[in-house]
Image (cartoon, helix red, strand yellow):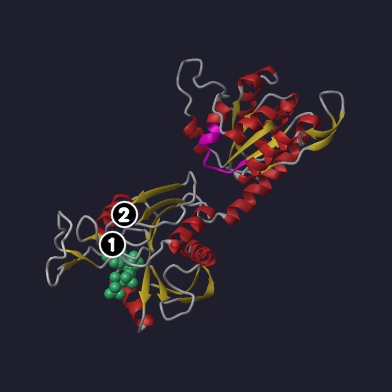
Amino acid sequence: MNLQGKKILLGISASIAAYKSIHLVRLLIKAGAEVKVVLTPAAETFVSPLVLSTLSKNTVISGFANSSNDWSNHVMLGRWADLMVVAPASCNTIAKMAHGLCDNMLMATYLSATMPVMIAPAMDEDMWKHPTTQRNLAQLQTDGVQIIPVASGELASGLTGEGRMAEPETIVQAIIAHLTVNENAQPLRGKKVLVTAGPTYEAIDPVRFIGNHSSGKMGIAITEALLKAGATVHLVLGPSTQAIPQNTQLTVRRVVSAQDMYEACNRVFADVDIAILSAAVADFTPANVANEKIKKDQAALSVTLQPTIDILKTLGAAKTNQFLVGFALETNNEEANALKKLASKNADAIVLNSLNDAGAGFGTDTNQVQIFTRKGEKIALPLQSKSDIAHHLVQFIAQAIAL
Ligand code: CTP
């Protein structure tokens, strides 16, 4: 019963090997999984939906609507499962997956899938070895799809060679291995996280602003590490030119000023489990923004500044059970200042950057930080790439919330 409580979505495409899917459903159910089946229209020629629905104890989905004309919700199906496995994956279905075609329910479900996807290809040896198929498989691997290796043996064409679908027992073993590795590697699966990153720009007039040197690199590295750990991320990003990862688990909200950033954070904060505020938010903003460009026909210019809202402190005061992480950028009395921020902003942890450390701070690809926690722990992470720092920070948070 190694798949107890796991939800598996089985996609079946048109191949002679589809007859083995019946045995695959039985094995998955025997291992404790809940199984739903989605068929391509052509697969119905090879395997009976009635047999599959009886064995899986669930309605088999093949069209965009069922017989009573109710729309089949592929988005919910794509979110329901812990894993989607397409077995057999025909040459045609592999090509569609590699190119994002959406002309049947299996493809619509694959394109909506937020969980890991595996495929067990099945085809004739010549099709398997064709450069187009190999190119499509390489594309799917790049997209994160795990390919269960084909076997060698007698093929439907009567020839012998590579291209046979893996045996159902092998597929079940691969599913168990994948889910086990994934659970260990994805400690934040199912968690929602708010991240702020980058600088904020505070307008003086229509062409000028007060900003800072933040690049957004650390916050984007944290976002990438969170996505790898399985989290759903809401990134609130100030003006930054860094490339943003493409991921269905990521929503990005671009903002300019501290006030915009606060409003964007406040909208989602109640709904997240974790908030990591790594943005370098301006502490002051011009009290009045000139409507027109300020001219230089004056001897001197003073701009009156007023404080911005402290986002971390405001969220700290409002928090219910969110794990709240702030950053502190200091140039002197680093530890004392970081501890002061930890308490005054009601954070669960503060990540201290010191501008005195070589290789740490704005724009660099490396960083060196210390994490101080509300429980009194102090964790020093030595100089390393921002992505390694992000990985360690995310692992630390995952452990802290699991306790
Ligand atoms: N921060 C915030 N809103 C602000 C200013 C800062 O949310 N208006 C957050 C930052 O994102 C960071 C933490 O507060 O997580 C600390 O930022 P930092 O600039 O080091 O400290 P400040 O609180 O601004 O204090 P000071 O500048 O006086 O050191």
The residue that appears at 43% across and 51% down in the rendered structure is 233
Residue 206 position in % (x across, y down): 21, 55
> Residue 350 sits in which quadrant?
bottom left
Q: Return the mark for residue 320.
A: none
> Would you say residue 116 sits in the magenta stretch?
yes
Q: Residues within 10 Å of mark 1 (few under 14, many from 20)?
A: many
Q: Which residue is mark 1?
A: 311
Q: Secondary structure at mark 2?
A: helix
Q: How many numbered dots are placed on residues in this image?
A: 2
Q: Residue 221 versus residue 214: which sits nearer the camera?
A: 214
Q: Is residue 225 left or right of residue 45?
A: left
> Residue 323 sits in which quadrant?
bottom left
Q: Secondary structure at mark 1?
A: helix
Mark 1–mark 2 CB contact (< 8 Å) = yes
Q: Which residues are magenta?
A: 109-117
Q: Return the mark for residue 265.
A: 2
The amino acid on which the numbered mark 2 sits, given as a three-letter code, is Cys
Q: Residue 187 versus residue 122: which sits nearer the camera?
A: 122
Q: Is residue 86 left or right of residue 296?
A: right
